[in-house]
Amino acid sequence: MFFQKRDKVHQSMYRLVKRLEKAKIPYAIMGGMAVNAHHYERTTADVDVLLNAKGFADFCRLFVPKKYATVPGRPRRFVDRINKVGLDVLVTGRFPGSGKPGPIAFPDPSDVCQKIAKYQVVDLPTLVQLKLAARRYRDFGDVVELIRFNELDESFTEKLHSSLRQDFIECLEEKRREDEYEARED
């Protein structure tokens, strides 16, 4: 049901997008749903959205707690009251991964979004960059698959912050090792 885009997670994302657009809050879908929009299909159990500080304040004022429940101890995590799907809000200026300051911060969604399938999604270079900066195993795996499904190569490093270029090359090399392995299995 997930890949037919009729599951609870997609329904939550569509509701969120409709609400944000009606309220004129700039946004970009992030995380697993953005990975899917950029051609690598995988499941995810929640929706991640990038908002600027004003957009986050407006989201909270307009939709919390009526449409989204808060999660104790997690000030930017919410639960869709209709179907209990999690929503993580990533805010411009904060840092991916551990949250500790680094060279990469979440950008303003207006600067990095592109329309895919009727909703705003973070663009591919930004998605790859933020996943590399998060430094989580799952995110590196997503980058390997984004390389595969978007046919990226070394030239893509020009679109990335210099501190992340080596990590991208390592993901590219991992993709190539996997390709060699698959070729031997045939």
Image (cartoon, rainbow, N blue to C red):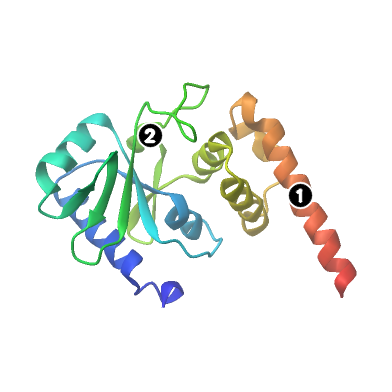
Q: Which residue is mark 1?
A: 174
Mark 2: give few (<14), some (14-19) or many (20+) Cα within 10 Å.
Answer: few
Instruction: Answer whether residue 78 is visible to the viewer in this image.
Output: yes
CA separation, marks 1 and 2?
A: 30 Å
> Residue at point 41% right, 38% down?
112
Q: Nearer the viewer, residue 123 or 52?
A: 52
Report the quarter where the C terminus lies.
Answer: bottom right
Looking at marks 1 and 2 on the same chain, the residue that comes earlier in the sequence is marked by 2
Which amino acid type corresponds to the residue marked 1 in the rendered image?
Glu
The image shows residue 58 at horizontal and vertical percentages of 15, 38
Answer whether labels 1 and 2 touch (C-beta < 8 Å). no
172 with respect to 160 (left or right): right
Name the residue tied to disc 2.
111
Q: Secondary structure at mark 1?
A: helix
Q: Closer to the camera: disc 1 or disc 2? A: 1
Report x, y in % for residue 21: 20, 50
Query: What residue appears at the point 45 percent right and 61 percent down from the top-left corner?
Result: 44
Circle 2 sits in a helix, a strand or a loop, which is it? helix
Q: Is residue 73 left or right of residue 167?
A: left
Q: Position of residue 95 (x, y in %)?
A: 44, 29
State the image quarter where residue 84 is shown: bottom left
> Along the line of sight, which residue is nearer the eye, 157 or 176?
176
Image height of 185 relative to 153, above or below: below
Tell me the quarter of the image containing the N terminus.
Answer: bottom left
Closer-to-camera residue (102/168): 102
| Residue type, numbered disc 2 | Asp
- Above or below 14: residue 157: above
Residue 110 or 9: which is nearer the viewer?
Answer: 9
